Image: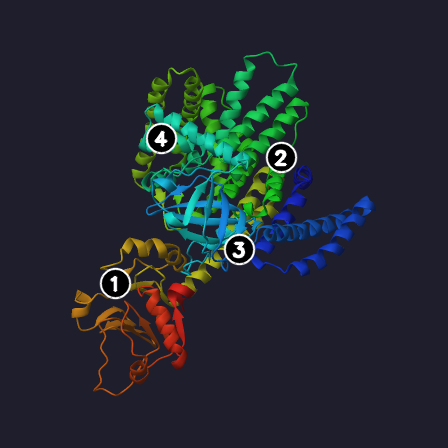
Amino acid sequence: MYYGFVEEIRKIPLLRIFIPFIIGIIIQAKFNIDFQLIFIIFIPVFLMFLLTVYFYSHKFIITAGVITSIFFLCFGITYTSVFSRKDNINLSDYKGGYIVAEILEMPKERLRNVSLTVRMLAINSGKNWLEADGKVLLYLGKNEKSLSLKPGDKIVFTPDFSEIKNKGNPEEFDLKKYLTYNLILSTDFLSSDEWQKIDSDLPIGTKQKFLRFRDRLIGILKETGLNDDELAVASALTLGYKDKINESLKRSYSSSGAMHILAVSGLHVGIIYGIIVFLLSLFRLNNLKIVKFIIVVSSVWFYALLAGGSPSITRAALMISVFSLGESISKHSNSINSLLLAAFIILIIKPYTLFDLGFQFSFVAVLGILLFYPRIYELFSIKNKILDKIWSLTVVSIAAQLATFPLVLYYFNQFSNYFLITNYCLIPLATIAIWLTLAVFVFSVFGFGTITIGKILGFIVKSMNNAVVGIESLPFSVTKDIYIDEIKLALIYLILLSFFIFFFLSKEYRHLVWAIIFIIIYNFVGLVEQYNLSRQKHIVVYNIDKSTAINLIDGRRNVIFANLSGLKKTNVEKLAKNFWLNKGVQKEKYINLDSGSASMLGNIINAGEDIFYKNKFIGFYDKRIFILDKDFLFDTKNTSRIAVDYIIVSDNPDIDFEKLKNRFEFIMLIIDSSNSLENIHKWVAINEKFGFKMHIVPIQGAFVI
């Protein structure tokens, strides 16, 4: 049985290249190793690899394998470093002049502005125009002018770039890292008079042409009578355009386990592939396999580009291309090798795609289907064709869910309990919807039948939307608030891998023992975490625009001091949710800091055994915090100094630094985000004389101890 396991591994030679390569990408992304050091290490490793290839002998197969792995590890580090340097341009110091840029993606309409990613083409900071390169994120004032922009349009603007910064709140989405992985390091906010669309003879890029064509197709769907949620879901389902789906409907699809239906990926490409093969089967092309291959692959890639060319759809298109090539030359490749080859090609094009959620979920789901599906499917032999199809769909859903559920827990902190019911309902409906959408596009050429088909399509999509909303509303539809970190994520996959090897490959009990060991380690890590969480103490001053929010965590207790008149609780909860899940705290308790509130009128508020609040003073174990706001008046009669650890400056008070020095003895001034930047700059200038230690939340990020 052991040799059977080894033979299965030997059938996947790309595995020995792919794993060290992605480890190299992760190392460089996390530690950003200096390029000179990388170069010094890579050259001798490269020479060793060349010597290994040249003098290869079966006697030294283990040594050759180790050197090959080290080489691709170093190659992953080196390639990622070179790639990140290519467009790694920070323009935050560039002010004035003019920049001509091309819009790369479909502009996104937001509540108060329009965001778009552009690539710079030329810069003029004086007399001459200079060729430029690099991507920038722009925010334009929302109006008819900005909403009319399309991919490929050229604009000229006067820049005032700023470096992209995070809010610095704990466990918050890392926008800076996300944009860095997309080679965007600078941003700018432009009013209507600071930019202008220009006519240009420069050609429009291939991707931008496809995005424009997609916009025309969405217009055709709209002309059939589709609107609102039906139009938004139909556009996402078939063309990969998800910007118009409202948050409530997105949540329903997510909670019911149907987000993969909206994200164009292998399922959708597979349906398109099936449609193309079916249509070609109507013609006699058995002796023209190469012609069939060219038609199939061209059609699949046309659809992939039309749907936005995301990593998940690119992976699917690459795999189908490899599969179709094998069929055309009567050779069948190992499916996992094809998957790894597709991943390797995508990462060569852009290494940071490794951190794209669509890439991760797509590849892991397909890997799960390739590994689990044939083995689970063979457990039962069903002769009835309809029941067999249902069993097949069930196994595909289980296989994909087995592989991806750790990622779902890690990224989304929830699990959809009725994912099987969702797939039973939605996959057939989604297949019909894609067929109908293609029919709309075809019949629109002839100018008839589109309204009728559109009504049927609208009914199908509406049924899908009703299904996910209904499934979400079922009792226990979602298990929420699950938190796992990277260590637990890795342990879950090690447990899955050990069980897979034991049950389906080796049948050796040592692999079952390994699974049990990993389960024990997982539980031990959990126990250590629970012990540490029970003893934790944290003070956090959040960075929330124009608001004061102070969070005290004592073991499981969770207390928020905030000005609730100008701050919605939902904003705090959305911002701090991941942090609270990480810390395993109970439901938050709010104390209102507003003048005249019930909390201000009482004597002492006890928020826990070691947390109290009175007259803008907060006590937290041995820490004392004073909130200095616009209601505070210095008592000139009382000359005794008050000892506190932190003074939190809130709501733009009029601060007399001399009186502050004489009245308080403190460690640090914390300027929170409820203060204006004008006042903050004034206080910083005054503080040069006094030398108080300061933490400026809107500039330096949240204060956390």
At which x and y percent is residue 153? 47, 39
Residue 338: mark in rendering? 2
Mark closer to the observer (3, 1): 3
Q: Which numbered circle lies on residue 653?
A: none
Q: Nearer the viewer, mark 3 or mark 2?
A: 3
Tag of residue 231? 4
Give how far apart the Cα atoms at labels 3 and 2 are: 52 Å
- Name the amino acid type tagged 4: Leu
Of callouts 3 and 2, the N-terminal one:
3
Q: Where the N terminus falls, by quadrant?
A: top right
Question: Compared with residue 337, is residue 389 higher up or lower down, i.e. above or below?
Answer: above
Residue 278 in sight in this render: yes
Upstream in sequence: badge 1 or badge 2: 2
Earlier-in-chain disc, 4 versus 2: 4
- Mark 3, secondary structure of its residue: loop
Figure quadrant of residue 250: top left
Res 183 seen here:
no
The residue shown at (20%, 87%) is 637
| Residue 542 in the image, given as x and y percentages of width and height | 35, 62
Residue 299 is left or right of residue 437, and the answer is right
Residues at circles 1 and 4 in contact by the CB criterion of under 8 Å: no
Instruction: Characterize the local packing of mark 1: few (<14), some (14-19) or many (20 or more) Cα atoms within 10 angstroms.
Output: many
